[in-house]
Image (tube, helix red, strand yellow):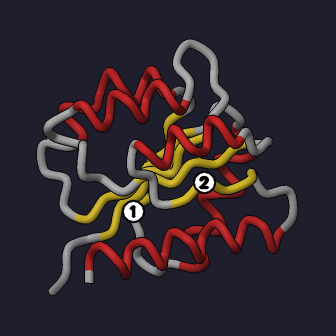
Amino acid sequence: MGLAKRIYVIDDDEDDRMLLSQAIGEVIQGIDIREFEYAYNFYLEMPDIFSDNGSSMILLDMNMPKMSGLELLREIRRSPEARNIPVILISTSINQRMVSECQDLGIEAYLKKPDTTAGFTLVADTIQNCFEKHFQ
């Protein structure tokens, strides 16, 4: 029996969190989806979250108040508990400098934040492919 799949959806937009979680749940059966409104809240709980990380991933919005997705990504990569967790970043815009920095920090993908059903399904498919790559 494989490890349970878990994804942390971190996005300050409640509607986006709901739509992303719904799309992920439709594409990946049996996944445990945990939502966080802010990167900073996730950061505060990170040591406890990843004490037993199993097969976890993070879907992270880039632009958030208090702590950006990039700032959280840097902290994730510094953390002994979380540094190997796959991270997919989403953003409303694609800034090449930021994409390059995120790639240097070892992200799985940097996707434009979806605004259509097909776009949300693409994000969910990308997550499924990442799970297959890392945990099977």
Residue in the image at 39% along x and 62% along y: 32
Q: Quarter holding the N terminus?
A: bottom left
Residue 133 at what x, y percent from top left?
35, 78
Residue 117, placed above or below residue 53: below
Q: Which mark is residue 110?
A: 2
Q: Toward the viewer: 9 or 97?
A: 97
Q: Amino acid at mark 1?
A: Asp
Q: Name the residue beneath numbered marker 1.
A: 32
Q: Position of residue 81 (x, y in %)?
A: 16, 40
Density class for disc 2 (Cα within 10 Å; few <14, some 14-19, many ≥20) is many
Instruction: Examine the image and state in which quarter residue 114 appears.
Output: bottom right
Query: Which is more foreground, mark 2 or mark 1?
Result: 2
Q: In front: 23, or 79? A: 79
Given the current orientation, which residue lies at the most extreme right position?
116
Q: Is residue 47 placed above or below 81 in the rendered structure?
A: above
For residue 130, which quarter of the picture? bottom left
**Cα separation between marks 2 and 1:** 22 Å
Q: Position of residue 71 (x, y in %)?
A: 47, 24
Q: Secondary structure at mark 2?
A: strand
Earlier residue among tags 2 and 1: 1
Q: Residue at x 67, y 29 (%)?
A: 63
Could you tell me which secondary element the residue under label 1 belongs to? Answer: strand
Query: Farthest top residue?
Result: 66
Q: Amino acid at mark 2?
A: Tyr
Residue ID at (31%, 58%): 56
Residue 105's spot in the image, x, y percent?
A: 40, 43
Residue at the spot 41% in from the left edge and 70% down from the top edge: 31
Closest to the observer, 28 or 100? 100
